[in-house]
């Protein structure tokens, strides 16, 4: 099991993108925001929140560039109400990240891990994906929401532009790994040293030690 957790520690670093902020990139944020707003308006989108769209977009771009957060964008199209579209788009955001995290973990487990059988690995992956979704649900922050009204069909398209705090995402993955391991009784099978390694080893990954 120690081998499994060492592997998952490496995976967490792959899942979490790192951004380097420079003065040049900060200056580019407003220019990029103008272009993004122009493109959105050309497609018929309006911002749902109160305020200036260009300012909201520029603030979001600058926030992502700090390296403290990462961006996830998703859409829901052809829905009967804005609220329904927002809910579906938010779930799509969470599903996208959970599925990506699962694929990375699964790929590493399949290629590098040989002491866990196929069924056990699949059960672990399924638990992990479900639990990451739940853990991240409260961590998704919406920067702004774009809405387009399809007048002929009287339906709405929503594009949700979100960010997730990098450290909070790390913690969400750790919690999901611990809970998935407990559900599949991996910790019981491989010893209490596993839990200690999660608490100590993966916390170092979070703070970059």
Image: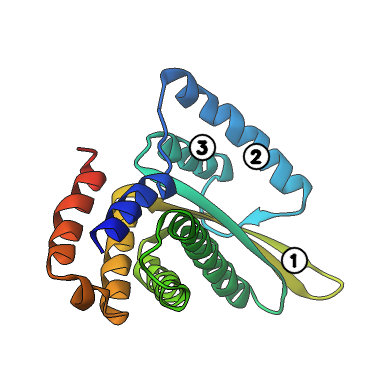
Distance Cα–Cα, label 3 vs label 1: 24 Å
Mark 3 or mark 1: whose residue is earlier in sequence: 3
Residue 167 image point, x, y percent: 29, 50
Residue 112: which quarter of the image? Answer: bottom left
Q: Is residue 136 left or right of residue 86?
A: left
Q: Is residue 26 above or below residue 46?
A: above
Left-right relation of 81 to 143: right
Q: How many numbered circles are shown?
A: 3
For the residues labelled 3 and 2, the Cα–Cα distance comes to 9 Å
Considering depth in this image, is 185 or 39 the residue closer to the camera? 185
- Labelled pair 3, 1 in contact (Cβ < 8 Å): no
- Nearest to the eye among marks 1 and 2: give it: 2
Q: Residue at x 47, y 43 (%)?
A: 60
Residue 69 percent location from the top left of the image? 39, 45
Image point (66%, 55%), residue name? 46
In the rendered image, which residue does mark 3 sit on? 58
Residue at x 28%, y 58% (from the top left corner): 5
CB within 8 Å, label 3 to label 2 = no
Lower sequence index among marks 3 and 2: 2
Where residue 136 sits: x, y (%)? 38, 65
Q: How crowded is mark 3: few (under 14 residues within 10 Å), some or many (20 or more)?
A: many
Front-most of 118 and 128?
118
- For marks 1 and 2, give the CA distance: 19 Å
Question: Where on the picture, by quarter, is residue 57?
Answer: top right
Q: In this view, does 148 lie to the left or right of 114?
A: right
Residue 162, how many percent across, how many down?
49, 54
| Residue underneath mark 1 | 149
Secondary structure under tag 3 reads helix
Name the mark on residue 36: 2
Labelled disc at residue 23: none
Most extreme residue toward the front is 115
Tell which of 180 and 91 is nearer to you: 180
């Amino acid at each position: 099991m120690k081998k499994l957790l060492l592997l998952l520690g490496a995976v967490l670093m792959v899942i979490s993108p790192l951004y380097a902020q420079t003065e040049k990139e900060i200056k580019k944020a407003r220019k990029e925001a103008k272009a993004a707003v122009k493109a959105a308006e050309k497609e018929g989108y309006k911002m749902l929140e109160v305020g200036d769209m260009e300012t909201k977009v520029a603030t979001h771009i600058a926030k992502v560039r700090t390296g403290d957060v990462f961006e996830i964008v998703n859409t829901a199209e052809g829905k009967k109400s804005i609220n329904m579209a927002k809910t579906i788009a938010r779930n799509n955001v969470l599903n996208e990240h959970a599925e990506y995290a699962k694929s990375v973990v699964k790929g590493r487990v399949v290629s590098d891990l040989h002491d866990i059988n196929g069924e056990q690995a699949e059960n672990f992956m399924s638990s992990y994906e479900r639990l990451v979704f739940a853990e991240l649900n409260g961590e998704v922050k919406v920067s702004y929401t774009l809405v387009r009204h399809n007048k002929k069909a009287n339906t709405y398209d929503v594009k949700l532009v979100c960010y997730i705090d990098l450290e909070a995402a790390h913690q969400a993955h750790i919690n999901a790994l611990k809970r998935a391991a407990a559900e599949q009784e991996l910790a019981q099978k491989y010893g209490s040293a596993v839990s200690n390694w999660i608490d100590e080893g993966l916390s170092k990954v979070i703070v970059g030690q």
